[in-house]
Image (cartoon, coloured by chain):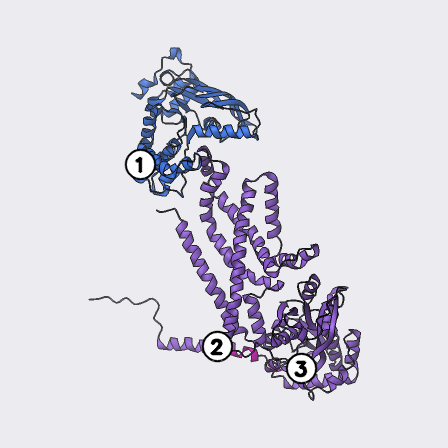
Chain colours: A purple, B blue
Amino acid sequence: MKFRIKPAIPPLGRKDLEKCLGAAVLFAALVAALPLSAHAVTLQEIKARGVFRWGADAEGGAPYVFPDPKDPDKLIGFEVDLAQALAAKWGVKAEMVQNNWDGLIPALGRGSFDFIMNGLEITPEHLKQVGMSKPYYIYSQQIVTAKDRNDIKTQEDLKGKSVGVLSASMSQRLLEKMGGVKIVSYAGNSEPCRDLKNGRLDASLMDYPIALYYAKPYAELKFSGKPFAYGYYGIGVAKTDEALLKDINSAIDKLLAEGKLKAIYKKWGMWENSMDARMKRYGKEDAVVQENKAAGLPWGTYLLMLLKSAVITVELSVISMVLAVGLGLALALARLFGAAPLRWLSTAYVEVVRGTPLLIQLYILYYGLPNIGIKLSAFIAAILGLGMNYAAYEAENYRAGIQAIPRGQMEAALSLGMTRMQAVRHVVLPQAMRIVIPPISNDFIALFKDSSLVSVITMVELTKMYGMLANATYNYMGLGLMTAAIYFGLSYPASLAARHLEKKLAYDHR
Amino acid sequence: MIIVKNLVKSYKGHKVLDGISMGQAKGEKVVIIGPSGCGKTTLLRCLNQMEVFDSGKISVAGVTIDAASDHSSKAWKQSRHELRMRVGMVFQSFNLFPHMTALENITLAPVKVKGMYAAHAGRLGMDFLEKVGLGEKAGFYPSQLSGGQQQRVAIARALAMKPEVMLFDEPTSALDPEVKEDVLGVMRKLAYEGMTMLVITHEISFARDIADRLIFMEGGKVVETGPAKEIFSRPREARTIEFLSKLLPRMPRAKAAAPVPDNQLSLEDLWG
């Protein structure tokens, strides 16, 4: 007779499966509904609350919303003044909610604030995502060049030139649509001005208000040609908040009629005489509305674009890791076996590099060095930044590995007549290598992911490409999963290879 | 072959070697005994320049090292290298290179230091492996060998450099009793072949078998030295007797403290 052993945990029955499935479906529905889950906001509710919350990114900078240079705790800018004017109109207070510019629309969907007021352009793809108010400002594009350049005056002149733009801005989309321009995209507004001054760019294309604040102060730069490509800034509300949108529109109408808008823009030096008439004509005249080139393409195209930028990521990671491993070894050997000044230098290098952020090092290499006459290309600066930074960590890995080798090993080698160098090379290092391979391969995977930081110095690698595509399409989820899959698909084989190497180098053949 | 004159070595104010002088002739086998911390290991380490000494002079296999000379000079480094080439050292903890096979452990130095051809060094290495009875273990890694086998490989490794003097620093202390004899056997063979050997050991019967001369050290000083037979049978110094009595439990303790009359006490008798 056979004994049947009753399992301690009963197997999942059909009912349980159904329950699990039900929970999964519910969860999926919740996730899908998330952007819509915030309830409709109305002016009545805002008035009852006594405060409205508007979303903006103070890092986006002047003259929109930015920290007062005289009192960095205080935010100023024309949009701050606008918010004050709206608040006065409604008899409530205004509260700015800081949010990364790229993430303003998703955050609005989550209900982080009542509306967006931060240079959000009225464009077809924005209109697909949010409700947009009447324009509160009409902006245009301004070409900025070095003082002595006279060959770039119109949009057409930009063809074949390298042109700096703010990442994901209207300027970038305009140039992408036109084609034939070497676009260099920056995370901020002051960097393209600096690179223009350094001669890394032929021109920079920026929103007029931005140009006023960032490019004007440079004596070496000038506004080239007339502003073109007019567009509108509008307030963005959740699609469901139609009533609120109406109230906002009537408030903007009143502010325009009362001359309050004009007063604000005059104060900030942003007023153009044609603006009054243009604003009043809004809706009757076609604005130059730029459709995003990247939106609405098949998935295969996105994948291809992501894969192409993944090649840059791999190149960056591999070359900088080679540099890091080589320089790290030299640093470790100098620290352990070098003469006193070498020892001191190596220790100082490791401590300083480890003790400062990689981001700052990249900024110094790329934007700082030109001040002393060294102009590195973005790729070289990225490799040097990543490589020199990781070299400090690798040096410590090697040091730990070498010090883990018993002293007797060195002594045995010396007693056989080997020099210190020979002993290190043939006896100590081969043993230390095996110890340091796991931490070094770990670091390689970390560097692989850290390589996304170099987007601040205009390198378009995988994460940056994802950001650009997601910004254009608002498909943060799908593209995000795709990008993550590419990262994983590249880093996992790397860790498998490291494991294999580790086994191959093992000498403990018990 | 070895001359040591007034060797002094201190660690943080403590004199580990306090004016040691000794000599050893070519082919002579000398055994150093003494309690732990007496400085015997330090003395050995000074002889192949694993340690730098404070004052005094050594001369080993024709190479002289003087504490007074400039240690950063090229000449000094050259003579240190010469010295190490002529002196073989066997450590208590074997110190085989774990990432290399037994044979590779032996051939590394002849190839890298003497510039010998790999094939030539390989044949030489096999000869020495067979000499220590481990010819069939050539391709084994240290982790696959027993302690006794590892120490025999270490001896072969030192011999492959054709040293004129072999120093042994407690070569069997880290070994299980059953494998000690394998290592001691190899050392006996070496002794009969006429190698100049300076050995630190607690293996008294081994010492009695091979030692021409015994040195008893304590407190960084040579307390007693003389022909091994003489010291074992009629130790003169009280400290020597006390130390030997601990190694040989059958020696009467009471007599150890008292001066020994007329060198009558025979340890040979006690061993029976």
Query: Which chain does the residue under circle 1 lie in?
Result: B
**Helix, strand or loop for disc 2:** helix
- Pointer 3 residue: A288
Q: Position of residue A385 (x, y in %)?
A: 59, 56
| Outermost residue, top side | B262
How far apart marks 3 and 1 lie (CA) works out to 89 Å
Q: Tag 2: residue type?
A: Ala
N-term-proximal mark, 2 vs 3: 2
What's the amino acid at mark 1? Leu
Q: Residue at x 47, y 46 (%)?
A: A432
Single out the mark in the foreground, 2 or 3.
3
Q: Residue furthest bottom?
A: A284
Q: CA distance from mark 2 to mark 1?
A: 69 Å
**Labels 2 and 1 share a subunit:** no
Residue annotated with mark 2: A28
Q: Is residue B100 visible?
A: yes
Q: Which mark is residue B134?
A: 1
> Relative to residue A91, is residue B82 drawn left or right?
left
State the extent of the magenta-drawn residues as a range: A32-44
Q: Counting other residues with Cα less than 10 Å from the Cα at mark 1, is it few (<14), some (14-19), or many (20 or more)?
A: some
In terms of image quadrants, where is residue A495?
bottom left
Q: Is residue B254 above or below residue A392?
A: above
Can residue B150 be seen by looking at this rendering? no
